[in-house]
Image (cartoon, rainbow, N blue to C red):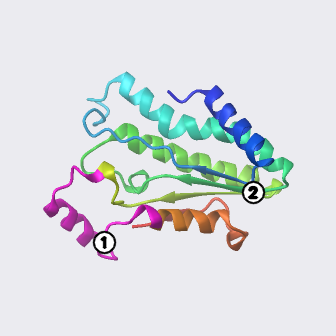
Amino acid sequence: MALETDGQKTIETAVSCFGKLNILYNNAVVLWRDRDFVVTRTDKATWDKIMAINLKGTVWVCKYGVPELIKQRGGAIVNIGSGTALMGFTVAQDAYTASKGALASLTRSLGVVYAKDGIRTNIIHPGPVDTPMQTVWDKATRTAISDWVPLGRLATAEDIAYCGLFLASDESAYITGFEDSTR
């Protein structure tokens, strides 16, 4: 489970190693197709674990990271959401979808509350990304998904990282509370 002490230790370690903190990049995710279903079928333990990893982990990192960003008179928070937070998913994974929807709301709130401190907060909602988590997709599924994506291909981890790099950089100095869907 994502514990508050883990978030605190993560920030303390980063500040100790680098002397300061300028960027928070929250990319924790778990998607369990074998136990996360519609709400009527998902058990409490699964729901709580997914919320702990996908949402609370970011909460705890921000709780201790934001004061460090304020000390630097600004910085960037980049959260990784999911396209399912915006539109759902035909094969319901409700805990995952809810956790990423809550993360989107948290991102907007942080973007408004801490803008006065020079902290920009944004979220990326990737569509289908070609990662080891997607090894369950057969060729027909991969083709169907690629055909659905306007660019005709799955995203790569690098595609998402480059978007995150832009949102963390000074080139995006006037963007906060922004949601980018990479579909």
At 62% from the left and 65% from the top, the residue drawn is 167
- Binning the other alpha carbons within 10 Å of mark 1 as few (below 14), some (14 to 19) or many (20 upward) gives some
Q: Nearer the viewer, residue 94 or 61?
A: 61
Q: Which residue does the image show at 26% across and 29% down from the upper left?
A: 41
Q: Residue at x 65, y 26 (%)?
A: 5
Residue 62: percent from left, percent from top:
67, 42
Question: Residue 174 at x, y = what percent?
Answer: 72, 70
Q: Would residue 47 be found to the left or right of residue 81 on screen?
A: left
Q: Residues within 10 Å of mark 2 (few under 14, many from 20)?
A: many
In 3D space, how far apart are the residues under numbered discs 1 and 2 (Cα atoms)? 33 Å
Instruction: Check if mark 1's residue and mark 2's residue have beta carbons within 8 Å.
Output: no
Which residue is outermost to the left? 140
- The amino acid type found where label 2 is placed reads Gly
Give, as a three-letter code, the residue at label 1: Arg
Q: Which residues are magenta?
A: 134-158
Q: Is 15 colored magenta in this rendering?
A: no
> How many marks on residues?
2
Q: Is residue 177 left or right of residue 75?
A: left
Residue 122 position by quadrant = bottom right
Q: Which residue is mark 2?
A: 75
Q: Which residue is mark 1?
A: 153
